[in-house]
Amino acid sequence: MSSDDVEREVLKMYEGSRPREEELFETSNFNHLAWSLAAFFAFVAIWLAIALVHAENQRYALLTNKCPDPLFKGGIDKACLVTVHSRDHWWEHLWYGVTHVRARPEDSGR
């Protein structure tokens, strides 16, 4: 047996332990950008809904005069506006805010 044959036999023994190049790098079929954008826009939608609920709560409290200033007639108690619950449930504010969207304010006839 020549040295080339011995070398070939040794290489043949260790052939199975050599990594395959097509499996050397990990690939993913998971679309990270699309799911990241979907999660981001879902977060933004939830954040905007919470902001709408708070704004509608304060708007309705001002409309129904739930936070009058105790010292000044016609004034508004701003500390009350932060904690007031002008409707029974938060989803009532969200429903009203989503369904009553106007592009321009109504004409008051002035």
Image: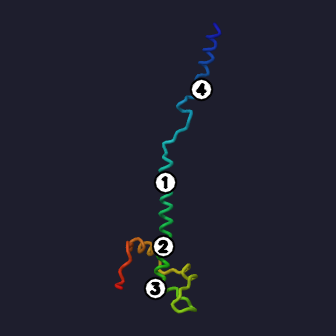
Q: Is residue 67 shown above or below 32?
A: below
For mark 3, give the secondary structure: loop
Q: Nearer the viewer, residue 91 or 34?
A: 34
**Amino acid type for the residue under numbered disc 2:** Val
What's the amino acid at mark 3? Thr
Q: Which one is in front, 45 or 24?
A: 45
As shown in the figure, which amino acid type bears the numbered disc 1?
Answer: Leu
Residue 90 at x, y percent in the picture: 48, 74
Along the polypeptide, which appears first: circle 4 or circle 2? 4
Helix, strand, or loop for circle 2? helix
Residue beneath disc 1: 37
Q: Which mark is residue 10?
A: none
Question: Can you tell which mark lies on residue 53?
Answer: 2
Q: Are marks 1 and 2 in contact (CB under 8 Å)?
A: no
List the residue tagged with mark 3: 64
Secondary element at tag 1:
helix
The local crowd at label 4, few if under 14, some if 14 to 19, many if 20 or more residues have their Cα within 10 Å, is: few
Q: Tell me the CA gap for discs 4 and 2.
A: 62 Å
Instruction: Tell me which corner region of the image, top left, top right, bottom left or bottom right, holds residue 110.
Output: bottom left
> Mark 1 Cα within 10 Å, few/some/many (few <14, many 20+)?
few
Nearest-to-viewer mark from 4 and 3: 3
The CA distance from mark 1 to mark 2 is 24 Å
Q: CA distance from mark 4 to mark 1?
A: 40 Å
Q: Amino acid at mark 4?
A: Arg
Tell me which numbered mark, 4 or 1, is placed earlier along the sequence.
Answer: 4
Q: Is residue 101 left or right of residue 79?
A: left
Return the disc, 1 or 2, that comes first in the chain's sequence.
1
The residues tagged by marks 1 and 3 sit, at their Cα atoms, a distance apart of: 40 Å
> What residue sits right under mark 4 in the picture?
18
Q: Residue at x 56, y 91 (%)?
A: 70
